[in-house]
Image (cartoon, helix red, strand yellow):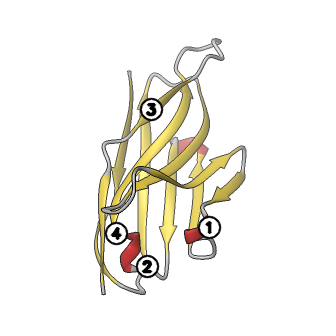
Amino acid sequence: QVQLVESGGGLVQAGGPLRLSCAASGSIYRINTMAWYRQTPLTQRELVATVTSGRTNYADPVKGRFTISRDNAKNTVYLQMNSLKSEDTGVYYCYADIAPRVGDPRSYPYWGQGTQVTVSS
């Protein structure tokens, strides 16, 4: 069984930084894409950033402010968020595309439970 556990959310003032972490554990053969999504009071769940084989991709609203990175040895993905704005407030979800069985390349989507980020203005 695979689990994704997020940490690092909280309350921060506008303009400040915050770093999210997400660690994958359990039966893991290979992790393909790892990503962060968020759900704000005004939007459905939306993509924030992805990292695949070292390549990163960002949603336009966060480009230049957020950085996604990954530690493959720890099966962990990070999201460094700088220059936070009130519109960044929401629940942030970790996502990973994981092949759980050794030797079997079939992969499946897994989600974390979400962590609240609140930016006060």
- Residue 119: x and y in percent read 32, 77
- Gap in Å between the C-alphas at discs 3 and 1? 24 Å
Task: State how far apart marks 2 and 1 are (Cα).
Answer: 14 Å
Residue in the image at 59% along x and 57% along y: 69
Which numbered tag is attached to residue 84? 2
Q: Among all residues in the image, which is located at the extreme front?
A: 42
The mark lying in front, picked from 3 and 1, is 1
Q: Is residue 94 left or right of residue 73?
A: left
Choose top left, top right, bottom left or bottom right for residue 19: bottom left
Would you name the residue on which mark 3 appears?
110
**Residue shown at 58%/50% (left/top)?**
71
Give the mark, 3 or 2, whose residue is nearer the N terminus: 2
How many C-alpha atoms fall within 10 Å of the one at disc 1: few (<14), some, or many (≥20)?
Answer: few
Residues under labels 2 and 4: Cα distance?
9 Å
Q: Nearer the viewer, residue 37 or 78?
A: 37
Q: Which residue is mark 1?
A: 60
Q: Quadrant of the N terminus?
A: top left
Between disc 3 and disc 4, the foreground one is: 4
Which of the marked residues, 2 or 1, is nearer the chain's N terminus?
1
CA separation in Å, label 4 and label 1: 16 Å
Residue 59: x %, y % from top left: 60, 61
What amino acid type should be assigned to the residue bearing mark 3? Tyr
What's the mark number on residue 89? 4
Residue sitting at x 31%, y 78%: 12
Quarter location, residue 49: bottom right
Considering the numbered disc 3 on the image, is that residue within a helix, a strand or a loop? strand
